[in-house]
Structure formats: C-alpha cells, structure tokens
Image: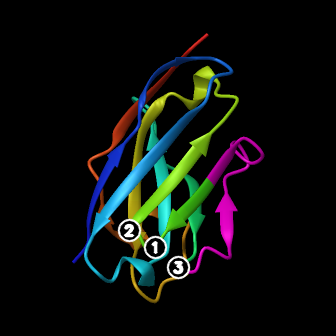
C-alpha cells in the first residue's frame, strides 16, 4: 500500500516556476515507477512525466519537454516536478501516482493504482 500527498501548487504568472512535491508513505516506494498527470476542467487526464524506480530513466509529454523536470529522492520517499516557463495552458490539477508493479505503460493513467489527491496549478497570462 502506498499513500501519496502532493503539495506545491498555486497561482503564478506565465513564465514563472513552481516545484510540486509528492510525499509517499510505505517502505516500498522505491520499487515503484512514479508519474505525474494533470487534468484541466472539461478535459481528459493527461500524462505529464514519469520516472523509473532508480531515477535513471525519465519520460515526458511533448508539451512539457524542456520545461518540466521530474526527479525523486527515495531516501525521502518523495518525487518532484520542477515546472519552469509555465504557460496558461499548463493550468490544471496535477496528481502524482504510482505505476502498477510490473507494468511499463507509464503513459497510461489506468495502469497506475495509487493516486494522490491532486494540487491545483493556475497560470495567469
């Protein structure tokens, strides 16, 4: 069992930066691939980024590549999403999630079986 709690969201202006954190409980956190997803009002949940258990491999949606960076600190049971050069279209609720053990479909939200409650990110123009 893994419980996830996000923090770090807020209201910023276009071009600003934010760093989201996702704190996990459970001593098996380091075994999981972790992902960030986002959902804007009236839109589907979209993949943002994922990081393998070791932190050696990271993956990004094209829309955030070069602006967002996912990282993790297994000693602190925490995964981060550094978001730079934010745009109004980045406005959404951001959620972290743990990928089902043994799955490699990190872009598919349905493959994640543990979710945080989400944190709102609003970017004004």
Q: Residue at x 52, y 18 (%)?
A: 12
Taking the image as shown, residue 51 lies to the left or right of residue 116, namely right
Q: Residue at x 46, y 89 (%)?
A: 102
Location of residue 107 in the rendering, given as x and y in whole percent from the top left corner: 56, 64
Q: Residue at x 39, y 62 (%)?
A: 97
Q: Is residue 17 above or below residue 94?
A: above
Tell me, yes or no, whether the two marked residues, 2 and 1, touch with CB atoms within 8 Å: yes
- Magenta stretch, main secondary structure class: loop
50 part of magenta stretch: no
Tell me, yes or no, whether the two marked residues, 2 and 3, touch with CB atoms within 8 Å: no
Which quarter shows the C terminus?
top right
Give the distance between the C-alpha atoms of the residues marked 3 and 1, in whole angstroms.
8 Å
Q: Which residues are magenta?
A: 53-69
Query: Can residue 88 be seen in the rendering of this structure?
Result: yes
Query: Dot 2: within a 10 Å radius of its alpha carbon, few (fewer than 14), some, or many (20 or more) residues?
Result: some
Secondary structure state at the residue bearing disc 2: loop
Q: Which residue is mark 2?
A: 77
Pick the front one: 44 or 73: 73
Question: From the viewer's perspective, is the residue at label 3 or at label 1 nearer?
Answer: 1
Q: Is residue 124 above or below residue 72?
A: above
Location of residue 64 in the rendering, given as x and y in whole percent from the top left corner: 69, 43
Q: Which residue is mark 1?
A: 74
Q: Which residue is mark 3?
A: 53
Secondary structure state at the residue bearing disc 1: loop
Location of residue 45 in the rendering, given as x and y in whole percent from the top left corner: 45, 47
65 part of magenta stretch: yes
Q: Earlier in the sequence, mark 2 or mark 3?
A: 3
Location of residue 55 in the rendering, given as x and y in whole percent from the top left corner: 61, 73
Pick the front one: 83 or 78: 78
Give the distance between the C-alpha atoms of the residues marked 2 and 1, in whole angstroms.
5 Å
Q: Is residue 84 above or below residue 38?
A: above
Tell me, yes or no, whether the two marked residues, 3 and 1, touch with CB atoms within 8 Å: yes
């Amino acid at each position: 069992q893994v419980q996830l709690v996000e923090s770090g969201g807020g209201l910023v202006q276009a071009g600003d930066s934010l760093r989201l954190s996702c704190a996990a409980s459970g001593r098996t956190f380091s075994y999981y691939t972790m992902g960030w997803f986002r959902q804007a009002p009236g839109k589907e949940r979209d993949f943002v980024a994922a990081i393998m258990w070791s932190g050696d491999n990271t993956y990004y949606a094209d829309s955030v590549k070069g602006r967002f960076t996912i990282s993790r600190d297994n000693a602190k049971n925490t995964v981060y999403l550094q978001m730079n050069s934010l745009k109004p279209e980045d406005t959404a609720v951001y959620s972290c999630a743990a990928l089902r053990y043994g799955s490699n479909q990190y872009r598919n939200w349905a493959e994640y079986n543990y979710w945080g409650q989400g944190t709102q990110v609003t970017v004004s123009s």
